[in-house]
Image (cartoon, grey):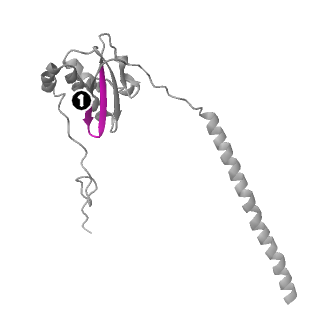
Amino acid sequence: MAVAKKAATKKAAPKKAAAKKAPAKKAPAKKAATIVNKTETKAEAKPEVKVEKKALKMEGKYFHGVGRRKTSVAQVRLYSNDKATDAELIINGKEMKDYFPTLAQQNVMMAPLKEIGMHGKFTMTALVKGGGMTGQVEAVQLGIARALVEFDEALKKSLRDGGFLTRDARKVERKKPGLKKARRAPQWAKR
């Protein structure tokens, strides 16, 4: 009896070991093959497209103004040009209509030029960083107003009366420890 039990245990043990080793070797090979196939299909499906920035060479004298709003900073250069169009208003390498697509944003940005009646008299390049769309639009607006004052000091009063030279200092209030947001306290729980 003892000999039969030993023979049975010896036969059963090699089968278990062989069963465990075989699937472990095959599984990684299948995963590697599927990953290679997925990367090949992704590369074939999405060809690389390079976006070309509009490069208008604006030369000559310019008037510079820096505008800020929330966390946005805009560096604006205005060039005198009597035959300027809206296509020559470049922001971060794009036309104004492409960068600020809504009409409301475009009107806010161009308000200082329209206020003094010089819409279509300047071409512009602007470099804007940080913040969201509203902050960037209002930063460019302040930069335009400051550049116009550099162009002609007599425009300062009319721009000041229109509210275009006032820097809006409102920023997002910081979150305080122990609160959910800047002022929002956690909900009170009785138990």
Q: Main secondary structure of the magenta part?
A: strand
190 part of magenta stretch? no
Secondary structure category for the residue under label 1: helix
Under mark 1, the amino acid is: Leu
**Side of 75 where 95 appears, left or right:** right
The residue at the far top in this view is: 83
The image shows residue 6 at horizontal and vertical percentages of 84, 84
The image shows residue 62 at horizontal and vertical percentages of 29, 21
The image shows residue 148 at horizontal and vertical percentages of 22, 22
Residue 1 visible to the viewer? no
Determine the residue positioned at 31% across, 30% down.
75
Determine the residue positioned at 66% across, 40% down.
40
How would you rate the neighbour count of disc 1 (Cα within 10 Å): few for under 14, some for 14-19, many for 20 or more? many
Determine the residue positioned at 29% across, 25% down.
104
* Residue 26 in which image quadrant: bottom right
Q: In the image, which residues are magenta? A: 66-78
- Residue 145 drawn above or below residue 186: above
The residue labelled by disc 1 is 142
Query: Residue 75 or 90: which is nearer the viewer?
Result: 75
